[in-house]
Amino acid sequence: MHYIVLDLEFNQSFPFKTGKKTEPVAECPFEIIQIGAVKLNENFDILEEFNYMIRPQIYPRLHPFVEKITGIREDDLKGQPSFPEAYEAFLRFIGKEDAILCTWGPDDIKSLFRNILYYNLDADALTDQYLNIQPFASTYLHQEAGKAIGLKNAVTELGIEIQEAFHNALNDAVYTAKIFRIVHPETITPDIFQPLTMLAKKPKRLRTDKKALFQHFMAQLNRELTESEKKLIKAAYTLGRNHAYDMAPAPKKHKESKTESKKKS
């Protein structure tokens, strides 16, 4: 049995003022542009590494924040494999033995299956067993209940040497694997992920999961949020969700054809 410690980097839509624009796609709001993973044996030793850059097809232009935080540039992704090609390579990397997918937080496993389903790929070819390593670290480090710890903070508190930059999928997968080796419980029971539930119809009235929303920002910032920051994030999220400041496109001016111009003259 192997543990496959996985990390992903994503791209998403952005309202660029010039050039080609892409609208958000509800079925796949976060498009994977890098898959990084390491394979561990039952002693938590790293056996193999996997690193694939992926050419974005849903959102061809990179979000400015994605470029800034990952250091990935559009030129880096030109000529790279598509997601279906990367997925096939990832399945070969996992191999035929029983495997458990391991991630830092719940977002990556959800986004992985969203991308798989978006491209109509075989989700059953991938193991449905998974572990979220983040709660193990929180328990080990005696974090306050309900509070998530960021990857960088966990690495620092556990005394793991920082040799490579964060926000690179392979580097983050390696760091997660090193954390897992230290904080894993004596008895490991994987959860079962059910990707087809993501296709189910959503209820008409949805409640905002404020806890998950704040944890997302805390993980990105690697620190706790102040109360004023929480209020600001909640307000901004609500305004965006309600399309409070959406603007209708300006009506296009009619462009005269050459025939019409000749008639006027």
Image: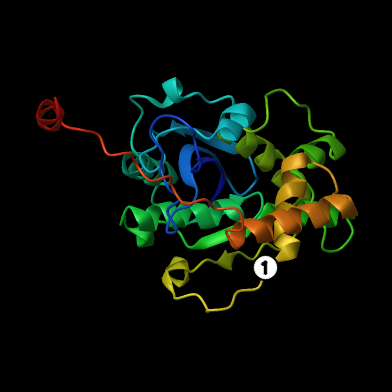
Q: Residue 123 placed where, x, y %?
A: 37, 59
| Relative to 128, residue 183 above or below | above
Q: Quadrant of the C terminus?
A: top left
Q: Residue at x 10, y 30 (%)?
A: 263
Is 222 positioned to the left or the right of 118 in the image? Answer: right
Q: Residue 198 placed where, x, y %?
A: 47, 67
Q: Residue 158 placed where, x, y %?
A: 84, 39
| Relative to 255, residue 189 above or below | below
In the depicted view, which residue is nearer to us: 16 or 126? 16
Looking at the image, can residue 35 be seen? Answer: yes
- Mark 1 belongs to which amino acid? Thr
Is 191 positioned to the left or the right of 19 in the image? Answer: right
Q: Residue at x 80, y 42 (%)?
A: 154
Q: Residue 96 placed where, x, y %?
A: 38, 51
- Quadrant housing residue 161: top right
Q: How would you rate the neighbour count of disc 1 (Cα within 10 Å): few for under 14, some for 14-19, many for 20 or more?
A: few
In the depicted view, which residue is nearer to us: 17 or 192? 17
In the depicted view, which residue is nearer to us: 13 or 46? 13
Mark 1 sits on what residue? 208
Model colouring:
rainbow
Looking at the image, can residue 1 be seen? Answer: no
Is 256 positioned to the left or the right of 71 in the image? Answer: left
| Relative to 26, residue 202 above or below | below
